[in-house]
Amino acid sequence: MAAASILSSTDVVLVPEITLPEKFGRVDWVAVDRRGERIINFAPIETHANQTTSTGGLTDAIGEHEATGSLSKDRYEFGLNTYHQIKTFFMQCLMKSQLFKIWDRKFIWILDHTVFESWKERFPLASYRFKKKDPIFFFSIDLVLDQGKGMFILEIKDKISTNRDELLKAYSRPPGGLPSETEFISNISRKMNSGHIFRQI
């Protein structure tokens, strides 16, 4: 059942939350190419959204809007925890792609556009391309306002493909591309000077 290409059959179904063997976790979805009850081919699919920090501020804003139909502040105290999401999705990608490489299966990721763009900026791949022969695919999606329908729709903003070796290289920058420790030492000094010291050793 080698996965020579992305699934293209008209009889493809999506099956949610399938557990992988030996504590490799689960995959969000599996696209299954079937003939009756027989599995001809399959492709694991992971979805990953961004996450907020200080969620209380977000719920306050939502609650106020639901109660009054408006927002009283220009800014509510919450943000996006994008870097944490990048670390989470990449660890999953590395672990699970070991299995899918051995099994000769394609691996598909659907990422929030802000996570996708921040990830590419922080850990650039050698090249950004989309080739069906690659084993790992990343699709960037975003909510876009459709003026005609008066509603937001999910839209694919970008797509790239790669392999596990290229991902590992992207996370191992050459020494010449790494920053010096000067800024880090300045940050330490700034913290100490502002009184952020627990105890003297």
Image (tube, rainbow, N blue to C red):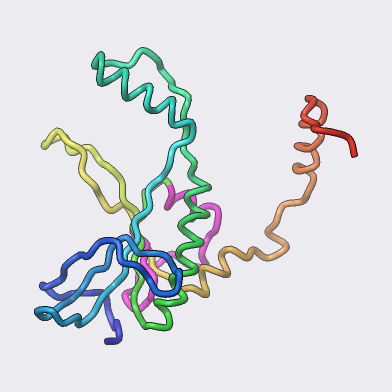
- What residue do we see at 43% from left, 27% from top? 56
- What residue do we see at 51% from left, 64% from top? 125
Q: Is residue 150 a member of the stretch shown in magenta?
A: no
Q: Position of residue 143 (x, y in %)?
A: 27, 42
Q: Looking at the figure, which quarter contains the N terminus?
A: bottom left
- Residue 143 in the figure: left or right of residue 58: left
- What residue do we see at 58% from left, 63% from top? 171
Q: In the rendered view, would you say 87 is above or below 41?
A: above
In the image, the segment drawn in magenta is 115-139
Looking at the picture, tell me which residue is in the foreground, 64 or 110: 64
Q: In the rendered view, would you say 47 is above or below 14?
A: above
- What residue do we see at 24% from left, 47% from top? 154
Outermost bottom residue: 1
Looking at the picture, tell me which residue is in the foreground, 151 or 107: 107
Q: Position of residue 67 (x, y in %)?
A: 25, 16
The image quadrant of residue 22 is: bottom left
Q: In the rendered view, would you say 184 is above or below 43?
A: above
